[in-house]
Image (cartoon, rainbow, N blue to C red):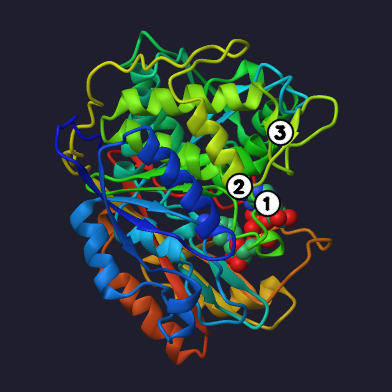
């Protein structure tokens, strides 16, 4: 949620991080200070030192409290120590603080920074908490592990609405949705359905949908056809790095993680230990993150001044080593000197690049999620997952017929491919079988029958590893047909 502008200094938490972190953070803070950002900075320690002190999450309780009180966190990259047992601080922050929207603007600065895409100006809005990143994984048999892909209606509504509000707020013309609902009809299907529903509320903004594979291919080849793109977590993770890279360099992009209460801002790159302590790093990614932060807290004029000074520095050919090219650069500078050059240009505007003017209008309209009337939910059967080392599905079916009650065996699949009845001998089989039982009649549908089925399975030494109930919601099937289509 964006903060209204205030005259009082805005309290923010700042972590200088590891590797190049302190260098790029000092450079960024010097620019913020020179531009007269009205901030009350509270420094906290997160990252390598905290991990190595025995805290597996990389952050102490005190630091958590500072972030939760200030609600705004500017974070330099950190180093996660090698070896197991250390939790990703970013994933912890995003989930614990409910930072559901990851916003990553990726624009090109051609011809001053080399790119194949001179007209690229894309904003990726990635759902940040759900999908395969729920982190629910299980080994179920010797041969099979599983990761649960969780997509929720509130999660979809929040991120899709955020994308349309962002587009309206920043005068963008189109929002595209990347999904894979030709395969994942229920999970990505829900994301797409919500996208279509919410798009109708924004007739002033164009909308379109892309299957993520071809959408990503088009983004890599012709990014200029896209404007704002919204997508579930995993696709967003991958696609946003590609988008940043093809715009010029991952070293140039900043990102915002926005929640209903708190927000975290950072560069998209890591702590670059290979160049740490050499005053070589480009502070631009973190500076861009700080600009996103200033816009978030309503200090848009300061954000504008910094952006224009930065653009002028870039077009004057003052470049750090990562973007320095003999043909387009004039002066090779280190981190500290780059910051000094930006500071000298505060108040001036670029001549080649378009001058940045905050055209933001009003606040984002992000109403709280309202749960709908519950649907009429009818139990139709159960998928029973079985660990079985046999090779002939007919044998398994024969055993399973023995446990049937009002639930009858209809189908067996292996890795989602139908193997009974009428499977193909060519199908490769693992030790993980999904056995679908359905009620013979709706009137018989009772959860008790499932418990009885499982009890009988136990008596017949059938190794049940998990079950999934099969429901219709308001007359609509809520599960895949499970025949490998
Ligand atoms: P990295 O992004 O740190 O470095 C990749 C390459 O890009 C290196 O050659 C590096 O020198 C260069 N580079 C990165 N930022 C630069 C900058 N601002 N200016 C100039 N060159 C820059 O990725 P990595 O090497 O895979 O990871 C290093 C460490 O960073 C790891 O411990 C990793 O876990 C951590 N990491 C942290 C974050 C984060 O805190 N958000 C994100 C990614 C990686």
Residue 452 x, y percent position in the rendering: 33, 78
Q: Residue at x 33, y 19 (%)?
A: 169
Q: Quadrant of residue 380?
A: bottom left
Q: Disc 3 marks which residue?
A: 246
Determine contact: label 2, label 1, CB under 8 Å: yes
- Label 3 neighbour load within 10 Å: few <14, some 14-19, many 20+: many
Q: Quadrant of residue 195?
A: top left
Q: In the picture shown, does residue 437 fall above or below 176?
A: below
Counting residues from the N terminus, which is met first, the one under dot 3 or under dot 1?
A: 3
**Residue at point 41%, 49% (across, down):** 151
Q: How many numbered discs? A: 3
Q: Whole-percent x and y of residue 44?
A: 33, 65
Q: Which mark is residue 335?
A: 2
Query: Quick check: can you spot residue 70?
Result: yes
- Where's residue 259, x and y in %? 29, 46
Disc 2 and disc 1: Cα gap in Å? 5 Å
Can you say whether 58 is above or below 415 in the image? below
Q: Which residue is mark 1?
A: 280
SS type, badge 3: helix
Badge 3 or badge 2: first in the primary sequence: 3
Query: Which residue occupies the foreground of this view, 54 or 171?
Result: 54
Q: Which one is in front, 110 or 121?
A: 110
Ligand 1 shown in quarter: bottom right
Query: Is residue 127 visible to us here?
Result: no
């Amino acid at each position: 949620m964006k903060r209204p502008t205030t005259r009082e200094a805005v309290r923010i938490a700042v972590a200088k991080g590891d590797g190049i972190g302190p260098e790029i953070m000092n450079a960024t803070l010097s620019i913020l200070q020179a531009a007269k950002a009205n901030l009350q900075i509270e420094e906290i320690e997160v990252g390598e030192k905290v991990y190595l002190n025995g805290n597996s999450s990389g952050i102490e309780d005190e630091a958590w409290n500072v972030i939760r009180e200030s609600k705004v966190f500017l974070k330099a990259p950190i180093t996660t120590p090698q070896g197991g047992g250390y939790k990703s601080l970013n994933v912890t922050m995003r989930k614990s603080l409910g930072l559901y929207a990851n916003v990553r603007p990726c624009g090109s600065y051609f011809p001053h920074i080399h790119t194949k895409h001179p007209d690229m100006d894309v904003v990726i809005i990635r759902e940040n908490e759900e999908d395969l990143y729920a982190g629910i994984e299980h080994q179920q048999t010797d041969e099979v592990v599983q990761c649960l892909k969780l997509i929720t209606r509130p999660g979809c509504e929040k991120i899709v609405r955020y994308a349309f509000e962002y587009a309206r707020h920043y005068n963008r013309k189109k929002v595209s949705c990347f999904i894979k609902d030709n395969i994942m009809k229920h999970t990505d299907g829900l994301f797409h359905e919500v996208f279509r529903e919410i798009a109708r509320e924004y007739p002033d903004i164009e909308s379109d949908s892309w299957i993520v594979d071809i959408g990503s291919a088009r983004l890599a080849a012709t990014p200029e056809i896209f404007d704002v793109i919204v997508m579930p977590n995993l696709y967003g993770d991958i696609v946003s790095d590609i988008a940043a890279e093809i715009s010029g360099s991952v070293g140039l992009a900043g990102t915002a993680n926005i929640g209903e209460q708190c927000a975290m801002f950072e560069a998209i790159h890591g702590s670059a230990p290979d160049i740490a302590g050499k005053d070589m790093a480009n502070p631009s990614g973190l500076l861009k993150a700080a600009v996103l932060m200033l816009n978030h807290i309503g200090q848009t004029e300061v954000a504008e001044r910094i952006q224009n000074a930065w653009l002028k520095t870039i077009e004057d050919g003052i470049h750090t080593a990562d973007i320095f090219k003999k043909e387009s650069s004039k002066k090779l500078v280190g981190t500290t000197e780059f910051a000094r050059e930006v500071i000298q240009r505060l108040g001036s505007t670029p001549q080649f690049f378009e001058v940045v003017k905050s055209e933001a209008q009003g606040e984002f309209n992000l109403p709280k999620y309202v749960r709908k009337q519950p649907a009429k939910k009818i139990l139709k059967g159960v998928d029973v997952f079985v660990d079985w080392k046999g090779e002939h599905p007919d044998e398994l079916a024969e055993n399973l017929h023995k446990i049937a009650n009002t639930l009858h065996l209809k189908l067996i699949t292996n890795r989602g491919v139908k193997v009974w009845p009428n499977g193909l001998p060519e199908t490769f089989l693992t030790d993980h079988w999904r056995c679908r039982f359905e009620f013979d009649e709706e009137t018989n549908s009772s959860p008790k029958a499932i418990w009885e089925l499982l009890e009988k399975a136990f008596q017949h030494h059938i190794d049940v590893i998990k079950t999934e109930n099969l429901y219709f919601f308001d007359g609509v099937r809520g599960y895949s047909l499970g025949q490998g289509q």
